[in-house]
Image: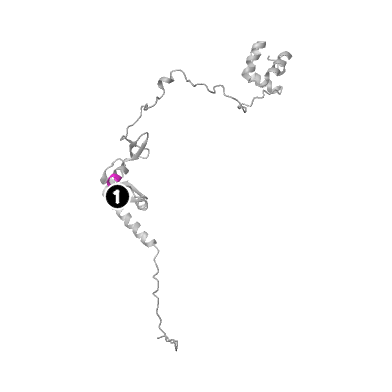
Amino acid sequence: MRGGQNRLLTPEQHEYFVRKNKGRSQADMVRLMKKRFGLELTEKQINTYRKNHHLHSGRTGQFEKGHVSWNKGKHFDVGGRSVETRFKKGQRPHNYMPVGSERINTEGYVDIKIADPNKWKAKHVLLWEALHGPRPKGYKIIFADGNKLNVTAENLLLVSSSELCRMNQNDWIKPEAELTKLGATVAKLICKTNARKEKPQRTPKPKPRIIYYDPKTMKIL
């Protein structure tokens, strides 16, 4: 079989190969040629022989229209020991955390689990809203001392987005809580002043002028 591509099969073997080739995979042809002629061929040799002799199996590698899967209607059983480690209905994973648990998220804030299966909320937001009600839209809750883990009522400040931007621009968030609170006050005053400047001034409407005239002479009295 080492003599070349044309000498891989005898004429008899070639004729048999052509007859059985249609619709069969390379692995199928390896088994057929071994069973019929005792040949020890590889799938690579089968593929090469097909190419050299322009033989096509007719297989596209895709399911044909109307194809029915071999396991249609059959119960799937993974077998083995997977049943022992498979999650059962109602079973909780080993890393389950009950409602009320705390964690530190990727941004460094403390989160509290408020509901199953996996609903969390920032602890500082929960604390502020418990004391003051829902947070107004467009406002942020920041830490006076800059420490995200120091979640206490006296360490939380409510600032608008524009006020926070002003504080960040001027580096007014300090490790000293009193300095940060002072910076928040200044930022609030600046934002209010700018808002008043940007507010369009209304032009007062002129008062209507009443003109009296003599209808006979048409002179203004």
The answer to whether one can see residue 50 in this image is yes
The residue shown at (32%, 55%) is 188
Residue 72 in which image quadrant: top right
Query: Along the horizontal axis of the image, is 138 left or right of 56?
Result: left
The residue shown at (66%, 14%) is 33
* Amino acid type, callout 1: Thr
Instruction: Examine the residues drawn in magenta and state their main secondary structure.
Output: helix
Residue under circle 1?
180
Pick the residue in front: 164 or 172: 164
Magenta region:
128-132
The answer to whether one can see residue 144 in this image is no
Tag 1: Cα neighbours inside 10 Å, few (<14), some, or many (≥20)? many
Q: Position of residue 11 (x, y in %)?
A: 74, 14
The residue shown at (28%, 44%) is 130
Query: Along the horizontal axis of the image, is 2 left or right of 94?
Result: right
Where's the C terminus, which quadrant? bottom left
